[in-house]
Image (tube, rainbow, N blue to C red):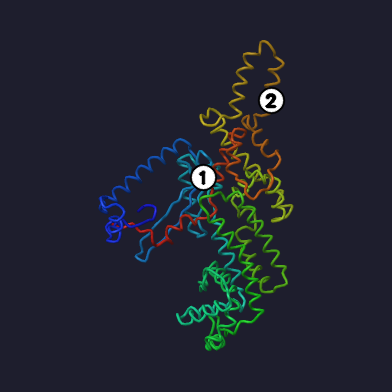
Amino acid sequence: MVILDELPFSFVEKEGFKKFMSKVQSLFHIPSRRTITRNCYEVYGELKINLKQSLREIQPRICLTTDTWISVQRINYMCLSAHFIDRDWLDNVFTVTVDNASANDVTVLELSKKLDMWGTNLIEGKHLHVRCMAHILNLIVQDGLKEIGPAIKRVRQMVKYVRSSSSRTRNFLKCVEMQKIECDKMLSLDVPTRWNSTYLMLDTTEKFEKAFERFDLYDGNFNSFLATDICEDGSIAESIQYEDWANVRNVTKFLEKFYELTLKVSGSRYVTCNVHFEDICELDAYLKLYIASDDLDLSKMASGMKEKFKKYWGTPEKMNKMIFVASFLDPRNKFVYVSFALEELLGEETRNVVNTKVEAYLRDLFVIYVSKYGKGSKSQPSSSDSSDSSASGISQYVSKNSLRTKLHMKKQKNDSGSLGVKSELDKYLLEDQEPESGDFDILSWWKVNSPRFPVLSQLARDVLAIPMSSVASECAFTTGGRILDL
């Protein structure tokens, strides 16, 4: 109970809990907080040992997210979260996902040097640094909201007025009841520096349009406040008009995609990296659509976002190649989708260059996995093992049939460029794409098909574990209730 609900250890000594337990089981002896503390650490120790044993057995590559925070007492804290896919598909660092602070560039570079010293850095750490997509989305939208229209500022002033006193809130609720508006949420004032709070404010407020139209009957100061209140930028707020509500709905609909995408990439218990490249391309198409819109406010907003988009995703050099590799390893995509999306995003000429580089990168990465899993692997048999056993059989057969021996040697020569298992990667890429499905489970697909692709499935397991945001680490600093006191 203490661990699951993140309760303080002293909870067991509270008077209310003692009375509750006396009714549940009067004979139960409630342990002291120090006993509870000791017991919790024992449980932690057991789980730590079990986790180490599990990691030792499956030996996955670990993807990290990290974030730092400084308290008001100037104490530095760091949270490190590890992501990996276990043996059921649900000591080696593969990637590190961090926000876009410039200091992180230096940090990841130093980490790469350490991994080189330990001999665990793949392809010189070229894919090690993953930038948090949630932070990039935040920067993109923040640039767009600089062009926010006057209607949005009026909504902010309206909400601020209603929420400023309990009597105004009561009068507003009467208007809501009279208009028979059914909504579980209540008005919330946004934090201008957090765009998602602005979206939530607009999304909720536009549902109360009819209530605001009646509110001035219960509060005569409402319209006069809007007419005389000075906004942050020095402009004077006015009563919101019908066309303003239409503008609010349009902006809310526009921001909805960014809000949903942020929630999607912020998850830490499901795979997101295989659709990361697709999300980038879809976002590019979405911004282009609104830039060409007849709505001048939305067009201006989308244009500002597009400029920030180019800063992080405008050229292939600015994107980690693992973004493309993860998309290749989605059996619904492969080279067909990635090649098409690259052309839409960057143009045909750039697409051809990127295709060549990324395919070469993928094959280099695959060769490394072949060297680790392709021969003598206890957990994963490979096609190279089959080749070795076949070679032994051929050697015994050489005196009986030299022609078959020559054929076998020719086949080995053709395959030698990729350690005898190139066909595994080629076979995957040349097979038909899986049909698109809303409930497609990529981990289940790789689990089922791992006997056909023993080496490639190991690569997929590591790549698909890459988190696209550092939110999992940041949550440690934004949940104030997670305090373990004695």
Give the mark nearer the N terminus: 2 vs 1.
1
Question: Mark 2 highlights which residue?
Answer: 411
Q: In the rendering, at what x and y percent does residue 443 appear?
A: 57, 43
Q: In the rendering, at what x and y percent does residue 101 appear?
A: 50, 60
- At a point 60% along the width and 18% down the height, the residue shown is 392
- Against 295, residue 288 (above or below) is above
Which residue is at the far top?
399
Q: In the rendering, at what x and y percent does residue 11 appear?
A: 30, 58
User: For this view, does 186 lie left or right of residue 435?
Assistant: left
Question: Mark 1 highlights which residue?
Answer: 94
Front-lying residue, 55 or 218: 218
On the image, which quarter does residue 459 sit in? top right
The local secondary structure at tag 1 comes to strand
Judge the density around disc 1: few (<14), some (14-19), many (≥20) Cα neighbours within 10 Å. many
Q: Identity of the amino acid at label 1? A: Phe
Which residue is at the far right?
348
- Against 139, residue 367 (above or below) is above
